[in-house]
Amino acid sequence: MKTLLGCGLIVAAAVMAQANDRQILYVAPDGNDSWSGHLPAPNTESNNGPFATIHRAQTAVRDWLAASPRPDSAPRPEIHIRGGLYLLEKPLTLTPQDSQTLIRAYRAEQPILSGGVRITGWKVGGDGRWRADLPAVREQGWNFTQLFVNDQRRPRPRLPVTGHYLIAGELAATDEALAGVDRFQFGSGEIRPEWSNLNDVEVLAFHSWTMSRLPIKSVDAQAGVVNFFGTSPSKSYWGIFKKGNRYLVENVKEALGTPGQWYLDRPQGELIYLPQPGETPDNTVIIAPRLERLLVIAGEPNGAVVRDVRIEGLTFAHAAWPIPRQGQAMPQAEINLDGAISATGAHGIVFKGCAVRHVGAYAIALGDGCHHNLIESCEMIDLGAGGVKLGAAGLDGWGGLNEARTAATPTSSHNTVRDCTIAFGGRLHPAAIGVWIGHSPHNTIEHNEIFDLYYSATSIGWVWGYAPSHAHHNRVLYNHLHTLGQGVLSDMGAVYTLGISPGTVVSHNVIHDVHAFDYGGWGLYTDEGSTGVAMENNLVYRTKTGGFHQHYGRENFIRNNILAFSQTDQLQRTRKEPHISFTFERNLVLYDRGALMGSQWADDRVVVDGNLYWNRAGDVRFPGNRPLDEWRAATGHDRHSLVADPQFLDPAKHDYRLAAGSPAFQLGFVPFDPTKAGRLTPRTLTAGLPPVPPSFEGIPAGF
């Protein structure tokens, strides 16, 4: 075998050296790593053809480049991958020596690079349950929290079967030295100490805008107290296990009873699956994830980088998230989680027409030292957490920059996410974001569709208040952002900003159906310290708590937007400050229920003028139950605003074009075309997948 492998390397290098214009190697499921890799299919003699693994092709390219150094202007080497399923033994890792390589799908075929293991050898019991013996679980510690059956995520058993339990009592931590609280009180019979493998049972405790997922350490049934290995940071108010908060219990073997559910008995090394009607071991493909990362781009943020690699048409699937013993409890955005595709020190990387699906954390994470990269026409579907992370968070915990972040260059910059679908996220970690930007400037998020998440679609900035921030000059343009929150978490916005962000523009987005569990289902949300943000030409409709809300910030500009049909307040402003909070002008506000303005408006630290307001259900009333003339006299606001029907053509069918005689034109409102928001090309690679089932309760009926 060593002789054949060596010959293969020589042949591959020779063939590539002869092809001065293009250097192409092929990989195929029916390939052989001892062949040359030069042919797209095996030859008739079955002694030459494509490689079997992408790692082998990568080695051949590296050897060829080392033997034949080439100028940057020379054609880049190419690896073409035939369609089929490739079960990776280890992540594909690109280092600086892989720079200027093209890795792509062969023609229109669909290769899938999987981090999973196909489960076979099922035994069907008399109870109809399938059982598979997994020695790697029992003997080697393999653990998985996800299972994919016929290309669909399947759930573990959960209690209660529908709805939620409510925390019965708040308790102090068992040890004052702990950074958070590690227990709470539950109702009678909700958690039982006799459950099988009790330490593998997880409690999912909901807070306002996040959720803690904690394995059980012990249960005191008599006192009704559950104790955890990890903690929820109760020293920050968000993490307290408050009485009345919702919680679920997951991975309970005794609750296994619904077709499609599964349970991994780790001590026994046995996987149990309850088939759905029509499923048999012969017609069912079951994959359990093993690798946490599928592609790693491993450049040095301040040294040798990986540059100018193009990855086209590949699907990355089945990435694991094995729960740590201490569980998962993050203050916001599940910021500690990595991506199935993870990069540092990456310059000029292009992902074109790729898909990431069935993963346990984020899809793609571009961390420290990632600059001028492009993610275009990609599809990120069925995500344990979120879609794309750009940049990094502060190293000093929840909050702002520490000295290293303040003094250093930005963690990343000038990255673009364009024409992508990011959908069905938060399936394990509901507080995850569609596209998150941390300490990173000059990024563009444009022409994407982001939907079916339980928290915000986009989040920009990672500094609370007015401390220095690298998150500036970011752009969120022409995106379609919808079906967010879904009654699971609270305090969210389709576009969420925080910190000093001069030059940040949010424009021409269409936002709708943002529904919080409690408060804070907003369309446009400038949170703590948001400064210098311009939000213009956005259409926002059918939110729970307001089309626009500012908690506090400085000199933001909210102009020429259409804000329609919020359930409660249409507009909110939380905090008065001794500077101009924002300018709100030339906006059209249409509603049929709730109040126009909520919370703090009656001071001169906001500029509100030239807007059009219309209540289809009655009079327009400003704070203090004032009509427009009294509001003007009392506050000086809205001196040039109108109360009038904007004359949208058909808002019931989401047609917000204005009739020719609309009074909005008197105010200088400039029409924009909402149909230009969203993707530029159709979803293709994941279009045929079955529906992704929800992980948590959805929107209440009638929203």
Image (spheres, grey):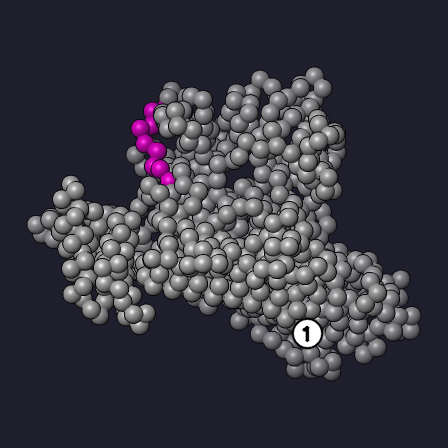
Please tell me in which quadrant of the rendered image residue 88 appears: top left
Q: Is residue 566 left or right of residue 356?
A: right
For mark 1, what is the residue? Answer: 560
Say what amino acid the circle numbered 1 marks: Asn
Q: Nearer the viewer, residue 661 or 377?
A: 377
Residue drawn at 40 percent across, 47 percent down: 294
Q: Nearer the viewer, residue 617 or 523?
A: 523
- The residues colored magenta run 116-124
| Residue 568 appears in view | yes
Q: Is residue 109 left or right of residue 292?
A: left
**Regarding mark 1 in the picture, which secondary structure is present there?**
loop
The number of numbered discs placed on residues in the rendered structure image is 1
Residue drawn at 59 percent across, 52 percent down: 393
Q: Is residue 117 magenta?
A: yes
Residue drawn at 86 percent across, 69 percent down: 604
State the residue lying farthest toward the left: 45
Residue drawn at 67 percent across, 19 percent down: 220
Q: Nearer the viewer, residue 488 or 352?
A: 352
Q: Is residue 153 left or right of residue 57?
A: right
Percent position of residue 618, x then y: 80, 64
Percent position of residue 305, x then y: 42, 59
Q: Which quadrant is home to the N terminus?
A: top left
Asked if 259 appears above or below 593 in the picture, the reply is above
Percent position of residue 641, x then y: 79, 76
Q: Is residue 318 left or right of residue 37?
A: right
Asked if 257 appears above or below 18 in the picture, the reply is above
